Structure formats: C-alpha cells, structure tokens
Image (spheres, grey):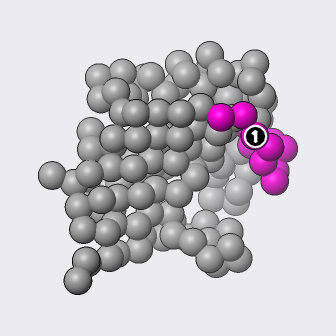
C-alpha cells in the first residue's frame, strides 16, 4: 500500500474547503495552489505580482521541506495569474527560483475569489 502523508499550513481555508497544503504519496509530493498571502490571508504586496510570486514560491518551499524535499525536486509548476499583462513579472519571479531546475510549467489566466490575489502556484515534486 502506498504511504500517504498530508501536510497543513494551518491556512484558514484548509478546513473550510477540505484540502492540505501538500500531500506526499510515496515519492511524489503535490503542493496545492499557493498564493502570496500572509497568515491572515492578506496579499503581502497588493498590486505587485512579482512580489506575490516570490512569496508564493517561498511558501511552497516550506511545504516541500515538510515533505523531506526542496525546490530542486520540483518537476512541474502550474502558475495561475489574474492579469495577463502581469505574465512577465510573474515569469521573472518564477525564474529566480527555477532557472536552473527548469520544471515543466504552465501559465494560465483566471479569476480568484479574492481580487487582491494576483498569482497562485501549484507544484509537483519527486523525492529521490
């Protein structure tokens, strides 16, 4: 049987929606959509997609550490942004963390429940 572990960030929406920040199943780690909000759920840099991107990836990094891996183990990211005009700033923030790792990645434009959120990122990793 595949060993499964759930990891919480204690975010306010985890219990409301019923999800975990990350799930490790065997040697795979899946990190839920992560935005650049603080502990109170407020975006750290309103109207600044670059800063929100960096904050989201740092939160992903914390979740991965909890599952015994790091950003180096990331094989896929999905980047959701609310404004297509922000894609270069989001790409710059993503590249600062992943330019040497080069995971597969998608960038999609969507709408978030909180209009102050400009970017959300999912990640998948393989533990060695």
Q: Residue at x 33, y 42 (%)?
A: 74
Could you tell me which secondary element the residue under label 1 belongs to?
Answer: loop
- Magenta: main secondary structure equals loop
Left or right: residue 116 versus residue 60 is right
If the image is split into quadrants, where does the N terminus sit?
bottom left
Q: Residue at x 31, y 69 (%)?
A: 25
Q: Is residue 122 magenta?
A: no
The number of numbered discs placed on residues in the rendered structure image is 1
Place of residue 32 in the rendered image (x, y in percent of width and height, measured from the top left): 53, 57
Outermost residue on the front side: it is 1
Per the rendered image, the range of residues in magenta is 108-118
Place of residue 83 in the rendered image (x, y in percent of width and height, measured from the top left): 77, 28
Q: Quadrant of residue 5?
A: bottom left
Q: Residue at x 46, y 40 (%)?
A: 77
Q: Nearer the viewer, residue 68 or 4?
A: 4
Place of residue 52 in the rendered image (x, y in percent of width and height, measured from the top left): 63, 36
Q: Residue at x 41, y 74 (%)?
A: 6
Res 115 seen here? yes
Res 71 seen here? no
Q: Nearer the viewer, residue 30 or 10?
A: 30
Outermost residue on the left side: it is 128
Place of residue 55 in the rendered image (x, y in percent of width and height, measured from the top left): 55, 39
Q: Quadrant of residue 117?
A: top right
The answer to whether residue 16 is above or below residue 44 is below
Q: Which residue is mark 1?
A: 110
Left or right: residue 92 versus residue 117 is left
The residue carrying pointer 1 sits among few (fewer than 14), some (14 to 19) or many (20 or more) residues within 10 Å by Cα, namely some
Outermost residue on the bottom side: it is 1
């Amino acid at each position: 049987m595949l060993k499964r572990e759930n990891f919480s960030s204690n975010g306010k929406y985890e219990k409301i929606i019923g999800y975990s920040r990350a799930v490790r199943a065997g040697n795979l780690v899946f990190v839920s959509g992560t935005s650049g909000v603080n502990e109170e759920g407020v975006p750290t840099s309103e109207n600044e997609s670059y800063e929100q991107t960096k904050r989201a990836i740092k939160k992903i990094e914390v979740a991965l550490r909890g599952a015994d891996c790091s950003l180096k183990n990331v094989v896929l990211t999905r980047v959701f942004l609310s404004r297509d005009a922000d894609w270069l700033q989001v790409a710059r923030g993503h590249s600062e963390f992943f330019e040497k790792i080069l995971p597969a990645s998608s960038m999609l434009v969507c709408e978030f429940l909180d209009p102050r959120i400009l970017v959300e990122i999912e990640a998948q990793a393989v533990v060695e």
